[in-house]
Structures are given as structure tokens and as C-alpha cells.
Image: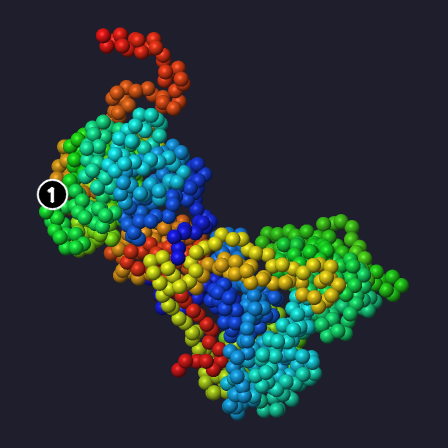
């Protein structure tokens, strides 16, 4: 019997700029079903963090409850983490972010944790533009409770026991666009070449970044008639673009070059190179992005890639004008300014 | 690249590095697993079938398998394959009942074997059960050849050698010991159906430098001297001994000299220490017995005073690589070095010698005095005369002699049946799934991180005072088990079925050594190697390439550092990966499946 991953690694594993090989970013051996899309996403996160030269202690993994929310155990063992209450990950992430704005917040959630029990939390964290990456591992079913249809299961989709879903699905990407999200992407667990640059760009985005990843449930939702199976997604996938994440750029201008290539400059000098596959879409125009989503839906396609980005954006800290220094770096004097400061505040309120 | 043809047994054979490197292709992982299960008798028999002398080889083999061992590529040290073989030999039960039981119905053919070493004995073992009448000639009083005369008893106890030689002689071999064959013509005149020559490389190289004649009484040719010790004609040597040479014979000479009264024994070698031909472990053992190895010293003369050897003069050199990349030994210009000696043992190489073969029989020799022998069939230029072992292609080792003996036996059998010698039998091959449950395999798939276990040795003061006291004690059962657990089961193959794959990437993500990549195919292997998750730079290791998948990509697996842990197959939701045990055994004479 093997539940144990051998300790040996390839002796020629390359090192990143920090001198770490990729196994430094690994987690425990997954206990999810064999072939689960979530494991691929975990591997994508590991690869992205390794390639981005992220120091593991600079990142916090946030999650709720569900198959998806178990995954932070399976990547980045050397990072911080908080496995919160079902659907309440955004609140905990908000608190953590307000306390220490210097960390990278990587939230992992599922379709149940986000679109059902956590919907109230999800919409508000978008409104507040909290600086975090929010990955939805979306398999359209409740895998942990034996595969009931979830709120993202498409109407007309057939589940494993042959029942047709009667209800309209919640389209998390369109909803986010509607709510004013400043970074919206969709991807597929079976396409790491697209997913990894998206994760990298999302981590660089200075506000709320949603990546809705279709992640087939091999055990309960990979049957004929499902719209979240490996086969169905591969047949109906339509990419907005192929994209590369360029970590550091010398001199870039966000200009439209001839043809279909477009470069999006991010706030810190890095950039996303987009090779657009559809000309009727501008990733920096919300209206255009919403149209593209709607058109794809009408054609029965799943649009993937970067859907919308607003590179210059104000996150929650900017909006409420908090201190630039994380709370844990402030001294007693700043944190407890004393009775005179309180009197001053009270005087203002009179 | 084209998809890999896994139906060709040679593909997976190559993945089992140890077995592939073994000249006799012993199924190593199979017997190591049996040792771990304490099935020592079966482990012994797998060995006996392949290499004929498991007890001997478990102590003395040159171990070409160990440098090839995959474990040596993922950590420091390979599995101690050789010494595990000894564990099987030491702990086996009644093996004789598993061996062919005579008397065998005669087939009317008579075969002569010249020389009683490992090659001849292998031929005898393979052919006797088929009904051949075997006549074995050897000049010594006992069989074993160089295994007896060259390998000192402190490395190979006589009882072990006798046991394994007797397993063969007991098959009804007609032995003609104490018989030096001095004419091949006489043998041919006896109308044998075939003659096999396995007379080894019996001539030790001499060193013709000033003083050689004058000091002859105290200068001994290494292999002759070892033989003389083995047959108890020699039982002492001077207190100060110089051993010339850097090979395993030199190591055996110096360690034997220590046991025969040599107090200050020194090995002096021309080349740098690192380039010596001796196996690293043999050098270690010599150094452990207080024998300094002095490298970069070229012998110039034997120094004789009053008609007696007093020592030798050496010139100091250092290794220089010239513009053609050739390594040369260049004198340092320092004064000659004098080293005292009462006796000198010359162990600087050995050669073939066939003074007993008449040159007018039609048996052709090449310019170096070696017989012209077919490399696949071992037949000479006389159709019924075959060669094997050191006699065929010059000095190698026991396991090579055994491997050649098997092949020569096949040729002799084919020749006697008037069949084409080049119609070699295909190997016996089997491939069986090891799947038992979700996380359960029929083999022990867990990979231990234990380092190689050291083989315990007897106390030095005991071994140095008794020439026949075996130095190595061998692993005990528990250590043998732990060492056996280090084996990566490279014979349990990863088999990929394209039609079942849904390209979920689970195998790619789980593989601890990043062996698996799904990628677009490339025109050339070089391009494909550069596209893998970790570039496949070890060109001696093959790529396993699948047919085209649904997304137009291919699966490519770099066999190089695969741990055969089975995780790819455990994490595969559709059983597109399976772990299947591959058994490959070289077919021996007469075992052809029709």
C-alpha cells in the first residue's frame, strides 16, 4: 500500500532565483480522488509560485470547506494558511489582509463554498476589491457529499445518476464582471499552459482577482451529458487568447499593436502578453468582456483566458485609506495612542 | 518521434538497468524481492539458472550491475546487488532437488570441454541434462579453474566453490582432472561431436627490466604465485613485499602476502590511484589491511646485492593529457625512489596462450594471438570447435565467462542438431499486472530512503593470521532484508494505454521525479528531450513515447530516474497507467519453445 510519496526528486531539478527547487513549494500527498481536476490546479499553483520566485512565507492560503478547500494542504507547505468556516473564507481573508497587507492572499474555494453557502460573502469581497487571488475550483457538483448538483451546474446538464438539472446556473465570471471585479479570468484544470500565467498575473494584480477554473469531478461529474466533464469541456472550450506572463519589463506601453497581439502592463512593471483569438473583444473594456461572455454562452461555448482586467485599480486599503504599514509592524505607540487620542476622536463626533 | 514499441522485449529489458548490464542478464529485481520475502531457495535458483555460481559470484563478482543501478542516479550508492546474492546463497534450503535430476537419457553425442573453469562448467551444466556425454579436461586436481587458483580463500571459501562446482559435476560429467591437454589434434582425433575450449588467459605478464634475471628467485608472477598458494605449494613470503600492478590480481596478491608473513607489503602502481583497474571495494579492503598503495611510480630496475634482491628503483611520474586528449605518464624529474623488498609479485596483466593448439589444424588466430571466434555463436574457424570465457576474447571476469558459456552451449546444441547457429532462441518474457486494489500492488512499491548497508567483516587480527578465514561475514537476514528494500523494482514497468487516457495530468502532478510530460511531439529525439518537464540529459536512458492523444499531444516518459513507485498508476482515474511486472530470462540451451 502506498499513501506515501517517495522522498527522492529528480537530481537535476532546476532552481529558481531564490535557490529553491520546485519541491520546496509542494504540499502533502493529496487524498482527493485519482484524476481530480483540483490536483492539477494545485500543481499549477505550485508551478506558478516557484516560477514567480515567491518566498513561501510571503503567502497566505485561505480556504473554506469542501474538496477544493482541502487543497491548500496539498501545496505550499511552507506558507501560512487558514482553513475557515464553510463559505466564510472572504471574511477571514478580509481580516487577515487588513491586519497585514504585505502578504499575498491566495483564496481557494469551490462552487458550493462560493456560489451557494458563501455567495453573500463572495459578492461583498468583490465589491470591496480586496487585494487577493480568488480561485474557484468549479466542478458543478458537491463532490464531498456524493455529487449532488451545485449552483453552477448548467441547466440541462445530466448528473451521474441520469437526472437532468432543472435550474439555471450561476455564472461566476459574469457575475463578477457585473459586480465590478477588476480581474476576471476563466480556465480549465486540464490546460496548465493557460492556467499558470493566469495565476501569476492574478497574484500581481493589486485588487480582487477571480479565476474561475472548470475542474472536472472524475468521480461524480465526468459522465456523458455533464457539461463539466473532461470531454465536454475540451470539446466546447473557446479561448479568448493565448497569453504569457512577462515578469519584468523594461519599457512597455499599453499599446495596441497591429494584428491581434496586445500587451497589458501591470502596476509593478510586469506585463501580460495576449495573443487575441477573437477581435471582437477588448480585455480592458468591461462592456466588451461582458458581451464576449454572453456570446460564448449563447453559442454553448466556455470562454477561457483573461476576460477582463483593470490594471490600475484601488483596493480596499486605498479606498478606506488605511496605514501603509502592516499592523504587526506598528509599535505600541501607534496601536494604542492613549486617552488623549480617544478624546480627540470623540470631540470630532460631538 | 514514433511511438515506442513496447512489444519489443528489449525496450523494457533496458529499463531494468542491472539486468541489462549483467552479461548473463540475471533477473536481479526478481531475486532481490524473493530475498526480502525470505524465499532464499527460490532466489538462489533464479541466480543458479542465470549465473550458475551464485555463492561464488555473491562474493567475487565484478558487479557490472551496480554502476548501472538506477538507485545510484537518485542517491549516492546503488543497491548492494552482489552481496544480496550471497544472502540467498548463505540462507538457501535444499536447492539440489530443484536442479535437473540425472541420470539423463543419452542423446548419443559426446562433447569435450578443455579447461575446468566457469565457462566450461556452464557449458557442462547446460548440456548434460540434454543427454550429452561431457568429458571435462583440466590440469588441476579439482574443478573451478581461475575461481580456485586466482581468488584467495579469504574472499571465497573453498567449501562454497566446491559446493557449486559439484552441483555441475554431479550431473554426470566425466572428469579428467590432472590432465594437461597438450594437443588439440589428439582431442579432435577422439571424434567428439564438438569441442569447447575454456582455458582462460593463463599467462601472467612479466616485467623485463634490469635485474630481472639476477633476482629471479624472489620475483614471482602474480597469478602463478596465487595458484601456488591456493594449491598449497607456497606458504610463506618475505617480510617486505612489493606488489606491482593496479588490478584486482594485484589486490589479491598483496592481501595474500599479508597472510603469508608479509609485514610491510606495498602496492606500487604506474598510474594515478583513481585510474587503477582494481574495483574500488578491493582497493578499500587492501588499504584496510595496512597496505599502502603508492601510485605514479614506474618500475625501473630490480636492485640486487650479493646475488640477492634488496628492493626496486622507481621513477616518479605524473599524468598529463596531451593535445590529442590522450593521457600520458610524464617523469617529474625527481630522483629515483628506492623501495626495499625481500620479494616482488608482478601482477601487471595476463594474456591468452595456446601453445597446445597446433597451427595446422585450420584453427585461425588473429594478429594478437587470439583465436578467430564468432562474437554471437562462439564458434572458431573449425565448425565443431567453440571457445568461451577468457580464452575467447581475452581476460574479463567470471560472470562474462558464464554468459559466454551459455551462448556456446546453445551453439553446440544447435550444431549437434545440424541447425543454423545464428538462429538464436528468443528470450523468455512475461508481463503481468501488479494491481490488487486502489493503493495495493503485488510488489512492495514504497521507496525507502535508507543508505546502503555496510557488509560486516571479521576482526582483522583473525583474518590476517589465517589465509582461509573469510573476511566478509555477509549480511545477516535482517540487514539483507533492509538492503533488499532499497531496490526500486525497475522490472515493474509503467505501461501506458493511450486509448484510456483522459489527459487529466494526475500522473504528471504526482510523479516525484518529474518523469512524465504531455507535450506536442517533436521531429527528433533531441528536440523532444528538451521539451520535457526536466530536460532528459541522460542519453543512455530511453524516452517512452505514446501514440497521439485526443489533444494531439503525446505522453513522454523519461525512464532515467523513474522510481517505479506506482504513483502514476495509483493516481490515474482510468487505469491508463498500469504497473506490470516484466520478467526476462535469457533462454538456455535446449529450452527453446517450439
User: Does residue B412 appear to the left or right of A198 in the view shown?
Assistant: right
Q: Is A298 located above or below residue B237 in the figure?
A: above
Q: Of A32 and A238, which appears nearest the observer?
A: A32
Q: Mark 1 points at which residue?
A: A168
Q: Which colour scheme is used?
A: rainbow
User: Does residue B31 appear to the left or right of A283 in the view shown?
Assistant: right
When asked about the image quadrant of residue A319, the answer is: top left
Number of marks: 1
Local crowd at mark 1 within 10 Å, few (<14), some, or many (≥20)? few
Give the chain of mark 1. A
Q: Of B110 and B569, which appears nearest the observer?
A: B569
- The image shows residue B301 at horizontal and vertical percentages of 79, 60
Residue at left offset 23%, top offset 33% = A183
Q: What element carries label 1?
A: loop
- The image shows residue A260 at horizontal and vertical percentages of 21, 39
- Where, quadrant-wise, is the N terminus of chain A in this rendering? bottom left
Residue at left offset 11%, top offset 44% = A167
Amino acid at each position: 500500500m502506498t499513501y506515501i510519496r517517495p522522498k527522492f526528486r529528480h537530481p537535476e531539478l532546476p532552481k529558481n532565483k531564490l535557490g529553491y527547487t520546485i519541491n520546496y513549494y509542494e504540499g502533502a500527498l493529496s487524498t482527493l480522488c485519482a484524476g481530480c481536476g483540483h490536483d492539477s490546479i494545485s500543481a499549477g499553483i505550485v508551478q506558478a509560485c516557484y516560477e514567480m520566485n515567491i518566498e513561501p512565507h510571503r503567502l497566505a492560503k485561505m480556504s473554506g470547506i469542501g474538496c477544493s478547500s482541502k487543497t491548500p494542504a496539498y501545496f505550499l507547505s511552507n506558507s501560512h494558511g487558514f482553513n475557515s468556516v464553510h463559505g466564510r473564507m472572504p471574511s477571514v481573508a478580509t481580516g487577515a489582509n487588513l491586519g497585514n497587507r504585505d502578504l499575498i492572499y491566495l483564496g481557494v474555494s469551490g462552487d458550493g463554498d462560493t456560489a451557494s453557502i458563501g455567495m453573500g460573502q463572495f459578492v461583498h469581497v468583490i465589491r470591496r476589491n480586496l487585494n487577493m487571488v480568488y480561485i474557484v475550483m468549479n466542478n458543478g457538483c458537491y463532490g464531498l457529499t456524493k455529487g449532488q448538483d451545485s449552483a453552477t451546474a448548467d441547466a440541462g446538464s445530466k448528473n451521474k445518476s441520469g437526472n437532468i438539472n432543472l435550474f439555471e446556473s450561476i455564472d461566476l465570471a459574469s457575475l463578477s464582471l457585473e459586480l465590478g471585479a477588476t480581474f476576471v479570468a476563466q480556465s480549465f484544470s486540464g490546460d496548465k499552459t493557460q492556467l499558470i500565467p493566469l495565476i501569476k498575473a492574478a497574484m500581481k494584480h493589486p485588487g480582487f482577482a477571480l479565476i474561475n477554473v472548470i475542474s472536472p469531478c472524475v468521480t461524480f461529474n465526468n459522465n456523458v451529458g455533464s457539461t463539466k466533464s473532461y470531454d465536454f469541456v475540451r470539446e466546447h472550450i473557446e479561448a479568448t487568447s493565448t497569453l504569457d506572463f512577462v515578469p519584468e519589463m523594461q519599457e512597455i506601453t499599453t499599446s495596441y499593436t497591429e494584428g491581434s497581439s496586445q500587451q497589458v502592463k501591470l502596476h509593478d512593471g510586469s506585463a501580460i502578453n495576449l495573443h487575441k483569438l477573437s477581435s471582437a473583444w477588448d480585455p480592458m473594456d468591461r462592456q466588451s468582456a461582458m458581451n464576449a461572455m454572453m456570446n460564448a454562452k449563447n453559442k454553448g461555448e466556455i470562454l477561457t483566458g483573461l476576460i477582463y482586467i483593470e490594471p490600475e485599480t484601488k483596493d480596499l486599503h486605498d479606498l478606506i485609506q488605511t496605514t501603509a504599514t502592516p499592523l504587526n509592524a506598528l509599535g505600541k505607540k501607534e496601536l494604542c495612542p492613549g486617552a488623549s487620542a480617544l478624546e480627540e476622536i470623540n470631540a470630532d463626533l460631538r | 518521434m514514433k511511438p515506442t514499441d513496447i512489444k519489443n522485449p528489449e525496450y523494457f529489458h533496458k529499463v531494468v538497468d542491472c539486468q541489462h548490464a549483467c552479461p548473463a542478464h540475471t533477473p536481479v529485481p526478481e531475486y532481490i524481492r524473493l530475498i526480502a520475502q525470505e524465499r532464499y531457495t527460490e532466489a538462489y535458483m533464479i541466480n543458479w539458472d542465470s549465473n550458475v555460481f551464485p555463492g561464488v559470484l555473491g562474493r567475487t563478482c565484478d558487479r557490472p550491475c551496480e554502476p548501472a543501478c538506477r538507485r545510484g542516479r537518485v542517491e549516492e550508492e546503488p543497491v548492494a546487488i552482489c552481496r544480496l546474492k550471497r544472502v540467498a546463497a548463505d540462507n538457501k534450503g535444499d536447492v539440489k532437488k530443484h536442479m535437473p535430476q540425472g541420470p539423463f537419457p543419452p542423446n548419443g553425442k559426446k562433447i569435450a570441454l578443455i579447461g575446468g573453469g566457469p565457462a566450461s562448467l556452464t557449458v557442462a551444466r547446460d548440456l548434460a541434462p540434454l543427454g550429452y556425454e561431457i568429458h571435462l579436461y583440466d590440469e588441476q586436481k579439482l574443478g573451478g579453474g581461475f575461481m580456485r587458483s586466482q581468488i584467495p580463500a579469504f574472499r571465497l571459501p573453498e567449501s562454497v566453490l566446491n559446493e557449486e562446482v559439484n552441483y555441475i559435476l554431479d550431473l554426470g560429467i566425466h572428469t579428467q582432472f590432472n590432465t594437461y591437454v597438450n594437443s588439440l589434434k589428439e582431442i579432435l582425433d577422439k571424434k567428439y561431436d564438438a569441442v569447447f575450449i575454456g582455458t582462460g588467459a593463463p599467462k601472467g605478464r612479466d616485467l623485463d627490466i634490469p635485474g630481472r634475471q639476477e633476482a629471479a628467485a624472489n620475483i614471482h608472477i602474480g597469478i602463478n604465485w596465487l595458484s601456488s598458494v591456493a594449491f598449497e605449494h607456497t606458504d610463506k613470503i618475505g617480510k617486505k613485499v612489493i606488489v606491482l600492478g593496479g588490478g584486482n590480481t594485484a589486490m589479491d596478491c598483496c592481501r595474500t602476502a599479508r597472510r603469508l608473513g608479509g609485514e610491510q607489503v606495498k602496492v606500487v602502481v604506474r598510474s594515478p590511484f583513481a585510474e587503477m583497474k582494481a574495483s574500488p571495494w578491493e582497493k578499500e579492503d587492501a588499504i584496510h589491511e595496512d597496505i599502502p598503495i603508492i601510485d605514479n611510480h614506474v618500475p625501473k630496475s630490480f636492485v640486487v646485492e650479493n646475488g640477492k634482491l634488496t628492493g626496486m628503483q622507481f621513477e616518479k611520474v605524473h599524468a598529463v593529457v596531451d593535445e590529442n586528449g590522450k593521457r600520458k605518464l610524464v617523469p617529474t624529474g625527481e630522483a629515483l625512489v628506492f623501495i626495499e623488498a625481500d620479494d616482488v609479485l608482478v601482477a601487471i596483466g595476463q594474456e591468452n596462450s595456446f601453445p597446445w593448439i597446433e597451427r595446422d589444424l585450420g584453427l585461425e588466430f588473429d594478429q594478437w594471438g587470439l583465436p578467430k571466434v564468432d562474437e554471437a555463436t562462439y564458434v572458431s574457424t573449425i565448425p565443431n570447435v567453440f571457445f568461451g570465457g577468457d580464452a575467447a576474447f581475452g581476460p574479463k571476469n567470471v560472470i562474462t565467462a558464464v554468459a559466454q558459456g551459455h551462448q556456446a552451449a546453445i551453439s553446440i546444441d544447435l550444431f549437434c542438431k545440424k541447425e543454423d547457429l545464428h538462429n538464436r532462441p528468443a528470450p523468455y518474457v512475461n508481463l503481468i499486472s501488479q494491481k490488487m486494489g486502489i493503493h495495493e500492488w503485488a510488489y512492495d512499491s514504497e521507496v525507502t530512503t535508507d543508505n546502503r548497508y555496510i557488509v560486516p567483516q571479521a576482526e582483522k587480527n583473525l583474518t590476517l593470521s589465517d589465509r582461509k578465514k573469510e573476511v566478509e561475514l555477509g549480511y545477516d537476514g535482517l540487514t539483507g532484508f533492509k538492503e533488499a528494500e532499497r531496490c526500486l523494482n525497475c522490472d515493474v514497468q509503467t505501461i501506458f494505454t493511450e486509448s484510456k487516457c483522459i489527459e487529466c495530468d494526475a500522473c504528471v502532478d504526482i510523479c516525484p521525479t518529474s518523469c512524465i510530460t504531455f507535450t506536442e511531439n517533436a521531429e527528433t529525439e533531441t528536440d523532444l528531450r528538451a521539451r520535457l518537464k526536466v530536460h532528459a540529459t541522460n542519453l543512455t536512458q530511453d524516452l517512452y513515447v505514446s501514440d497521439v492523444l485526443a489533444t494531439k499531444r503525446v505522453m513522454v516518459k523519461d525512464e532515467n530516474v523513474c522510481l517505479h513507485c506506482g504513483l502514476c498508476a495509483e493516481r490515474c482515474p482510468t487505469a491508463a497507467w498500469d504497473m506490470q511486472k516484466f520478467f526476462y530470462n535469457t533462454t538456455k540451451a535446449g529450452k527453446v519453445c517450439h
